[in-house]
Amino acid sequence: MSEANPEKNTALMEKIVSLCKRRGFIFQSAEIYGGLNGCWDYGPLGAELKRNLKEYWWRKNVQEREDIVGLDGSILTHQEVLKASGHVGGFSDPMCDCLLSKARLRADQIESQSGTAYWFIGASHADSDWSVEREYAVLVTEGQDENKARKTARQYYAQFLPDKQISPKTLELAGERTELVEESTRFNPENGSLLTEAREFNLMFKTTMGASADESDESSVAYLRPETAQTIFTQFKNVVETNRLKLPFGIAQIGKSFRNEINPRNYTFRSREFEQMEIEFFCREEDGLALTDEWLERRLKFYEEIGIPREHLHVVDIPDGERAHYSKKTYDIEYEFPFGIQELEGVAYRGAYDLTKHQEHSGKPLELFDDERKEKVLPHVVEPSAGCDRTILALICEAYDEESITNEQGKVEERTLLRFSPRMAPIKVGIFPLLKNKPELVEKAREIQEMLSPFMNVYYDEAAAIGRRYRRQDEIGTPFCVTVDFDTLGESGDEAKDTVTLRERDSMSQQRISISELRSFLLDRIQ
Ligand code: GAP
């Protein structure tokens, strides 16, 4: 999907982003102040969609399982936890800056380019006697005008002019030389400017705790957690001691994580604040590899159950040398987003790495007593770690559809719809009186609303023609609509009395159903 037609996919993504804003799924954080980069607010429908996903994940992984318990750990994290886990020293991405635009780029994501690099050693301004000495280069790729290099270099050197009235065009460049470069990542693909050398940038958000704390007080430093997993490891002993758990067993958690991503991008895909749904499944060493495969299958089935078909998912078995050094097996589950095939979840066999590190660092034993074997063990762990926001984005991309239909008046029109699985849909049923100025119809529709709303999200709508009301619900993915008409009131005889029209979103098929059966009919389909 993503490789086939990049322009079409960009246009599709734009339509999805626009629908999400227009219908209140996702807004940019602090939009009225220009936006907070990498942060998103979920509007009323987005909040419901997210709640459905998280509740279903919890139901499948905690509620319906005897061997997994839940946890809700703090976001603010003790610095020692993250020193032990390796995040303080090592959780970083290589970054570099564009010398011209100051844009910050992930060094490992820069596309390589070939061409001629134009190097300069400085610039001067004859009239004011001003000069600067600094090496700088611009890449000119095939087909580009070499004068672009000189123009860009003048703009670069003009940054150092004390008198901002001097035009960059009047600068003399010094020491021009050229060099052929192959597959280089030293230049900004946007403007050809030389980049700074790559340096490591720690992705954690650091803060200080306590009223008297300041930056220089090292002991007051805390971090916003970069993953939910660490609280599971640090509370491992408490959870084991307060619950009767036997290996293998899991601890599950859903919650916010924070990473100061260098380049937040692709809408909500790479954010600075996001939610994770993680399980640490503790086991005996000899079961680790088989359980990793089992969890992979279970997670793929989960995605199918929420409406992301297997054929749009890709499983990558991460090869030796690319996995974390302590992992004997890691699978990435990827989804075909319109902007490319990208990771949704990782399923990793992490050995005993995490518990070993926390045991060493805290000096507290974290082994548990294996009753069957009558020995102390430090369990190994398999970790299915999913991104909630990424799954929401995948659900929206998967559900988005456009089709031509013939409307009630026989005219062909375009309909935009979200084909959410009824389980995930934010609103389960739209309830419409045929006419808003007929009190008997309105009263009946309100009765149905009252009957259903304790069990599911319903949307009462009496404005506009029925066709328009259906379209509004189609666009937000409501799987069912119920219309109360004159037959409901018994005007065409007793047979149809107290029945309503139930319309299904995808097929647009309609059937008559009695009001008394409505609740169980809907509940069977949305759970
Ligand atoms: N505990 C393991 C862990 O955190 P990860 O691969 O770094 O592993 C797991 O993250 C999942 O969290 C990813 O597969 C992704 O779905 C989600 N995730 C990670 N960084 C994210 C970001 N910046 N924005 C949105 N989701 C992110």
Image: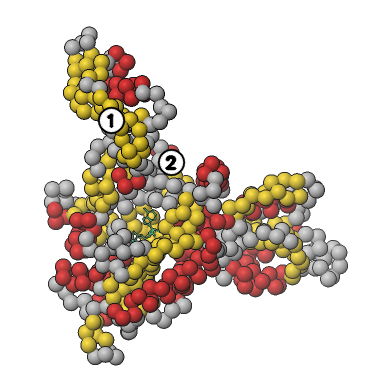
| SS for callout 2 | helix
Please state if 521 lies on the left or on the right of 180 as rendered. right
Residue 515 figure quarter: bottom right
Disc 1 residue: CB within 8 Å of ligand 1: no
The percent coordinates of residue 229 (x first, y second) are: 31, 65
Q: Residue at x 32, y 45 (%)?
A: 106
Q: Position of residue 498 (x, y in %)?
A: 76, 68
What residue sits right under mark 2 in the picture? 31
Q: Residues within 10 Å of mark 2 (few under 14, many from 20)?
A: few
Q: Which mark is residue 431?
A: none
Of all residues shown, which one is farthest toward the top? Answer: 127
Q: Quadrant of ligand 1?
A: bottom left
Give percent across and percent down for residue 300: 48, 68
Q: Is mark 2 within 8 Å of ligand 1?
A: no
Specify few, some or many for label 1: CA neighbours under 10 Å numbering under 14, 14-19, or 20 or more: few
State the residue position of label 1. 179
The amino acid on which the numbered mark 2 sits, given as a three-letter code, is Glu
Q: How is the image coloured?
A: secondary structure
- Within the image, what quadrant is residue 247 found in? bottom left
- Work out whether 65 lies above or below 88: below
Q: Is residue 276 visible?
A: yes
Say what amino acid the circle numbered 1 marks.
Glu
Task: State the quadrant of the C terminus.
Answer: bottom right
- Disc 1 to disc 2, how far (Cα)? 45 Å
Sequence-earlier tag: 1 or 2: 2
Q: Residue at x 35, y 46 (%)?
A: 109
Q: Is residue 293 above or below residue 262?
A: below
